[in-house]
């Protein structure tokens, strides 16, 4: 450790509590089955710390500890959490801990009472940035947490994620994002999926008083209530969202009063009383076990520091801070060891000393770890795919909308984990009738009508995808996918890169114009979604491609967005002959051969290009990239090298779609072969107009494509 300054390893230790050793308890009385909740080694020797493994089964639901056993178990952990955060603050000031260090000092009682009854690896949880102790109770070690905050090569996220943005999706501890409300719907979907598979599990969704103001707080509670999902929504109310006081956040008397609006039970308790939190959480779990459904628990907690290490918290009035210090849960829990458990000052000091030794050992182990090496990092946002060969499917002739319906039926029939969710997908059969008859064949638990909450639906689907589900999300219109921009682009799209776990979600986006539906029902948005890493985009133009895109998208381990042009649903048809080879689906599609111009189009513009080919005297080679992300342009580049000319056609405005990017990439690869500058045929850069005369003028068509071909061949 010669590279680590000695003053860092010898930072003065201050604080009041650690994990209780069984040896110290033995000096007072022989341990009972419940007082064995202490987590220290009986021989007093140091060993690796693993709270999840060392806490007794009696600490987890359906068991309840006595108050004495509870404090013997959690006081050492509360002290451990407090001292670790104090050390992280010191290491931050010395330049070793990285990023935004949010501080949970003062919140230990909430974490201890909440996480202790739950079952790591079984219950589905979403912790937040002041949940360090909760992570310890779910199996993380102090050394792992120090590595995470140091952002070293051995951090749980390999240095890829912020110091509090971590979890372990594979064990149902979902990693957080800073868009805090967006985390709430994930445990709802995960818990629903697990219970659908026959597991007796609960969910925990933690949010702060500030995060409870977000729209997804409502969406998640509403979803959980409608579908009777036993998720405990726990509000950590420390009276400030960063610096904004609660008076500027809500006007109800208590946040738990909102529970009535969802037809569920709500309760407000003292979040500085660890035993009160533990008792309330145990009671909520028992109630949800008896009658599945969500509950809302508001814990009035406190924050003894600012929002983060850089925040002095001077916006908190002095009298308020003095009140917080009087309510500090750590000294209160320490007093319980004396008055309730009968431990002497010397015994408590021994517990604390061992925690200090353990923290020092963790710091000593974490600081010398190597920095992340860019050369050994996994620089891909996509989970590796190994497409299986599945059952073939043939139909002599289907319209594109029928191909959607048949693909969904095929997936539901052949994959018992698959389920469809969206608005009006049930009895109504979806807005464009592509889901017609599915609920009759597969039932309402596999074809799920959902409330209007696009973001919550995607979060629900993401959570379900982590517990064995294969969700198929239908948006009524691609335009409405923007309601879920954070969930799709920043949560699901980054999930594999951040967590190492795949996020297999199929999202269907009915898109495009030509049906006189106006600006909010006619967009494509393939340009928008192509800007988010980790998303796969497929844009079919024929019935064959439509069927293949949906089937391949479901079996891929990444979030897959399939763009289904609405104008083509019932206007275009063709045969479907799928041989079951999913690997062969992921390729560009060629429709014609020619030597004069390479035309690249997708969606409805493929058919406009084909119509243009029939009106033109020139030889057009028409291609659809089909997979818009990640792009495979090699066959198209070879075509341009043959023709020497490139024309890209897109339905949306020039600045909105992928056309300019396609031109740029193809030009770089085939620059010396180009005989003329490439051209883009696109719509006007305005919202899609409503009146048919205006929309017809706005959208590209065969005549405009022919005119562009004439120009490029001059």
Image (tube, helix red, strand yellow):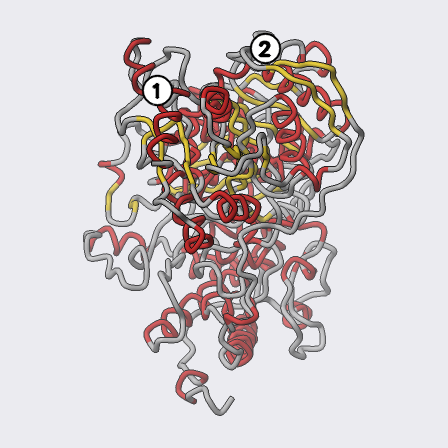
Residue at the (52%, 54%) spot, across then down = 498
Residue at the (30%, 45%) spot, across then down = 241
Which percent across, then down, holds residue 110? 47, 48
- Work out whether residue 94 or residue 64 is closer to the camera in this orientation and state it: 94
Comes first in the chain, label 2 or label 1: 2
Residue at the (43%, 42%) spot, across then down = 645
- Which of the 4 image quarters holds residue 358? bottom right
The residue that disc 1 covers is 520
- Work out whether residue 616 or residue 8 is closer to the camera in this orientation and state it: 616
Label 2 or label 1, whichever lies nearer to me, is: 1
Residue 126 versus residue 614 in the image, above or below: below
Residue at the (74%, 15%) spot, across then down = 396
SS category of the residue bearing label 2 = loop
SS category of the residue bearing label 1 = loop
Which percent across, then down, holds residue 640? 49, 45
Question: Can you tell which mark lies on residue 429?
Answer: 2
In this view, which residue lies farthest toward the bottom? Answer: 2
Which percent across, then down, holds residue 517? 37, 12
Classed neighbour count for the residue bearing mark 1: other residues with Cα under 10 Å, few (<14), some (14–19), many (≥20) = some
Left or right, 173 with respect to 601, comes to right
């Amino acid at each position: 450790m010669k590279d680590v300054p000695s003053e860092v390893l010898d930072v003065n230790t201050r604080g009041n509590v650690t994990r209780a050793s069984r040896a110290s308890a033995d000096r007072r009385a022989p341990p009972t089955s419940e007082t064995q909740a202490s987590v220290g080694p009986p021989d007093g020797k140091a060993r690796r710390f693993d709270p999840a493994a060392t806490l007794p089964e009696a600490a987890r639901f359906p068991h309840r500890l006595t108050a004495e056993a509870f404090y013997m178990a959690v006081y050492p952990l509360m002290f451990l959490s407090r001292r670790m955060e104090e050390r992280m603050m010191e290491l931050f000031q010395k330049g070793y801990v990285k990023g935004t260090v949010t501080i949970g000092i003062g919140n230990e009682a909430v974490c201890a009472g909440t996480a202790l009854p739950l079952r790591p690896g079984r219950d589905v949880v979403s912790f937040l940035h002041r949940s360090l102790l909760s992570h310890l109770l779910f199996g993380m070690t102090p050394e792992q947490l120090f590595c995470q905050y140091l952002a070293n090569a051995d951090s749980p996220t390999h240095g890829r994620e912020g110091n509090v943005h971590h979890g372990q999706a594979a064990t149902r501890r979902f990693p957080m994002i800073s868009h805090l409300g967006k985390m709430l719907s994930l445990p709802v979907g995960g818990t629903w999926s697990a219970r659908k598979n026959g597991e007796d599990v609960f969910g925990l969704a933690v949010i702060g008083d500030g995060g409870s103001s977000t729209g997804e707080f409502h969406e998640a509670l509403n979803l959980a209530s409608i579908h009777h999902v036993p998720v405990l929504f726990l509000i950590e109310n420390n009276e400030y969202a960063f610096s904004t006081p609660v008076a500027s956040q809500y006007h109800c008397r208590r946040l738990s009063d909102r529970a009535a609006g969802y037809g569920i039970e709500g309760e407000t308790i003292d979040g500085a009383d660890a035993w009160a939190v533990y008792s309330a959480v145990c009671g909520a779990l028992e109630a949800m076990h008896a009658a599945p459904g969500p509950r809302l628990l508001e814990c009035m907690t406190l924050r003894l520091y600012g929002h983060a290490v850089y925040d002095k918290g001077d916006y908190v009035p002095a009298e308020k801070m003095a009140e917080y210090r009087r309510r500090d849960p750590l000294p209160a829990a320490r007093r319980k060891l004396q008055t309730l458990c009968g431990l002497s000052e010397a015994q408590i000091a021994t517990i604390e000393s061992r925690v200090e030794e353990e923290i020092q050992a963790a710091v000593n182990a974490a600081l010398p770890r190597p920095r992340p090496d860019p050369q050994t990092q996994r620089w891909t946002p996509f989970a590796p795919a190994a497409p299986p060969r599945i059952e073939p499917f043939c139909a002599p002739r289907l319209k594109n909308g029928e191909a959607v319906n048949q693909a969904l039926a095929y997936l539901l029939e052949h994959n018992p984990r698959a389920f469809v969710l969206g608005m009006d997908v049930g009895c109504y059969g979806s807005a464009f009738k592509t889901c017609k008859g599915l609920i009759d064949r597969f039932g309402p638990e596999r074809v799920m009508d959902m409330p209007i909450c696009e973001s919550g639906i995607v979060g629900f689907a993401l959570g379900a995808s982590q517990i064995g589900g294969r969700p198929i999300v239908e948006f009524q219109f691609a335009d409405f996918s923007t309601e879920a921009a954070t969930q799709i682009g920043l949560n699901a799209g980054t999930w594999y890169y951040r967590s190492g776990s795949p996020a297999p979600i199929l999202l269907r986006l009915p898109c495009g114009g030509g049906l006189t539906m106006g600006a909010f029902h006619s967009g494509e948005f393939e340009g928008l979604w192509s800007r988010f890493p980790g998303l796969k985009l497929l844009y079919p133009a024929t019935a064959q491609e439509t069927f293949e895109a949906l089937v391949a998208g479901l079996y891929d381990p990444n979030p897959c967005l399939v763009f289904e042009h609405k104008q083509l649903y019932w206007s275009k048809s063709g045969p479907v002959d799928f041989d079951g080879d999913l690997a062969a689906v992921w390729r560009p599609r060629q429709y014609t051969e020619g030597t004069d111009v390479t035309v690249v189009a997708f969606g409805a513009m493929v058919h406009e290009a084909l119509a243009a080919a029939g009106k033109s005297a020139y030889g057009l080679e028409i291609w659809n990239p089909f997979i818009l992300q990640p792009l495979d342009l090699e066959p198209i580049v070879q075509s341009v090298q043959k023709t020497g000319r490139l024309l890209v056609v897109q339905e949306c405005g020039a600045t909105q779609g992928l056309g300019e990017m396609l031109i740029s990439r193809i030009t770089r690869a085939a620059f010396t072969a180009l005989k003329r500058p490439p051209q883009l045929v696109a719509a006007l850069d305005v919202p899609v107009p409503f009146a048919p005369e205006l929309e017809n003028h706005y959208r590209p068509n065969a005549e405009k494509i022919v005119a562009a071909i004439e120009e490029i061949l001059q």
